[in-house]
Image: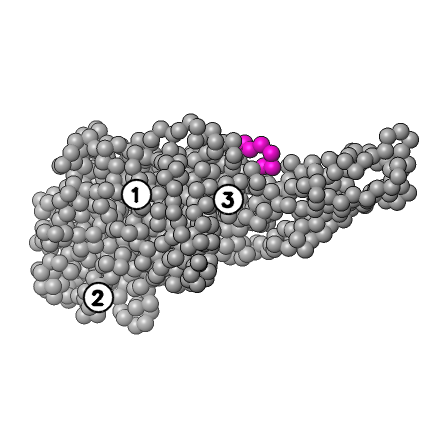
Amino acid sequence: MISESIKNISKPELLAPAGNIETFYAVLRAGADAVYLAGNRFGARAYADNFSEEEIIGCLRYAHLLGKKIYLTVNTLIKNEELDDVARFIEPLYKAGLDGVIVQDLGLLSLFGRRFPELDLHASTQLSVTGKDATEYLKKLGVTRVVPARELSLDEVKEIKDTGVEVECFIHGAMCYSYSGQCLFSSVIGGRSGNRGRCAQPCRLPYSTSYKNDCYPLSLKDMMTVGIIDRLIDAGIDSFKIEGRMKKPEYAAGVTSIYRKYIDKYIETGRLDISDEDIKLLQNLYIRSEVSEGYYNKYNGADMVTIGSPSYNGSDDAVLKAIHDRYVNPTGDDGGNKTKVSFIASFIEGSPAFVSVNYGDITCEAYGKEVDTASNRPISDEDIKKALKKLGNTVFSVSDDDISVFTSESPYYSLKEINELRREVIGKLEEEILKDRGYGERAVNETTEVCPAILSGDITNGLTASVTSMDQLRAILDGGFETINRIYVTETMLTCEKEIGEILSEYKDSEIRFYGILPFIRRNSSKYLRDYVISMVKDKSLKGVVVRNLEDLEFFVPLRNSGMDFEIITDFGIYSWNNESICQLSDKADMIGLPLELSQGAHKELLRKNKEICFEKLIYGRYPLMQSANCIFKTGFNCQKRNKTKINFTFLNDRTGRKVPVMADCAHCHNTLYNSVPLSVYNLLNEDNLSYRLDFTVEDRDLTKKVCDYYITLMQGESLDKPEWEYTTGFEKKSTQ
């Protein structure tokens, strides 16, 4: 007996990946309700085959006739010069009925919302949405569906669902070690940016750690949630997403078929009862050596990591062939992925030939010329049925029992003309079905103007230092560096270091302005730490906050707008690659961090096109390569949180001998991996709306002082040699690809 609670549960959408046409048809045959795919530009899987405009339009028509949906991934960051191209790329697909677009760039959300008012906007997991505040921010931009960060627990997902948006969650496939959208590892190491769809997967390479040599501490096991699919359904998740646009059609179709089976089974019976055979099938489809259920039931852990090897298991050839024959290249009725119709045909001598087709409440008719009297062999009922059953290139099928034929004694009508009547009536039926399902003309707003730039606050240019330790802070304060007029202190330092309160009181009325720099990622477990920061803002110990995620941005902006006097600065990880995204941030932030992956030339363009806005540029500091909920210390069975320490550093050694610093922020249960050497820019831009920043992470007191001395001298106009420490100039000469 099915419980009332099961009866009231909505069946979630099963969303499958397609990297090419073959996979598209295969996953629909396997039971997908919707497919996500990319065009040949602007998608986060640049190395998949992807789809041409003509192919996408054909796929849209095919899917819509089956009652399925297609979502286009435009989940990369967009440069200024690409904005018009993206709009032109989307327009014909929008007109053809594109169901939704999955977006990372805040500027694109704004642009698409204005230009394509009937297009559903989905916030990509690349936006690292972790809670209801970020979701509310995105709802204001017109977002109707959010793909949260994969690191969230089921309870956190439910909180996002409670805001009223649709929620789309991953249920199967490869997992990134970093929060999606917050990884610069591939970009910095190899110039191939994950934010541009070109990730080289350095997380799958071996590293040496303090506890093991040549291991894989950054390689997460693949996700497989079929065993908890009932809990995910009960949570009210709207769409279940399978990862894998780079994988073969047999993988996508096979995985889709298994999840289709158990979603339907649970909805119908309230039970799962997963067979060992189906588990084995999933494990034989390009799965890494081991699997996990992801983060839904746990925050992190060593058992989520493929310490030994990230390589894939071999696939069972017999399994692949069975899937191929059933879904990829089926025989017979297209693998069962057809819409049943019925025909009525009349071929009466002396009367016009007549064919009608029926689907549900829709009936379409076609008339031909008068039927002749046969001089030799008349057409038979079987001839007519055979011609009407030729529906192979359509989404329709018909059986002999659903074709009613009326003929006179000796009718003649050519088979060619019968085929033409069939094509005509099927074409009419297709148009009526599409019209009935709402796929008609859609309005396009021709304006492409960027929303008006809003004047920033009174922050002036100068030099900022960001610190993560008391030694660094003391080096700056004791060094007499008057040019440094802003100091950013991490939230962890503010809440854990006893000396901070005394220092803030001592410098409260000085020329130095202190700001609290908030965590890269905000989760529920650390929201209480905001209260410390707010209290320091209220008593003027802090002049403002530096926000690094949409969760904190949406939380602090209303506080300022309600009358609390403080400044908001957005950090580099809240991406502002183009004028549209800058516009979205300009009425919320007093200063905007320039993107780390863009060149000096690209920075100059943004500065000059947004002269009324203050920007900040990193000129010294280690690029943050990854933000992770998993922990290098915990993976090594040495969790530092148990020791009540708050900030800890360790190192990973890569194959070239480079040492990659890893900061464990135990106050936020969060790891940041930093580049092995710091960015050091020595050719500075001279723009009135630009401030510079020195970012200190693992530097000791002496190196902190040396760096400050160097850049203060450089800003005073003196000619200096290149820095004496090991460094990189990053993307100063060329933006990431």
Viewer can see residue 733: no
In the figure, 668 relative to 390: above or below? Answer: below
Which of the 4 image quarters holds residue 543? Answer: bottom left
- Whether residue 731 is in magenta: the answer is no
CA separation, marks 3 and 2?
48 Å
In primary-sequence order, the first of circles 3 and 2 is: 3
Q: x%, y% of residue 438?
A: 61, 55
Crowd rating for badge 3 (residues with CA inside 10 Å; few <14, some 14–19, many 20+) = many
SS class of the residue under badge 2? helix
User: Which circle marks residue 292 in the picture?
Assistant: 1
Crowd rating for badge 2 (residues with CA inside 10 Å; few <14, some 14–19, many 20+) = few
- Identity of the residue furthest to the bottom in this view: 563
SS class of the residue under badge 1? strand
User: Which circle marks residue 598 in the picture?
Assistant: none
Foreground: 289 or 482? 289
Viewer can see residue 561: yes
Q: Amino acid at mark 2?
A: Asp
Q: Nearer the viewer, mark 3 or mark 2?
A: 3
Foreground: 679 or 225? 225
SS class of the residue under badge 3? loop
Q: Image check: 585 left or right of 249?
A: left
Which residue is painted at 35% across and 43% down in the image?
Answer: 224
Q: Which residues are magenta?
A: 329-334
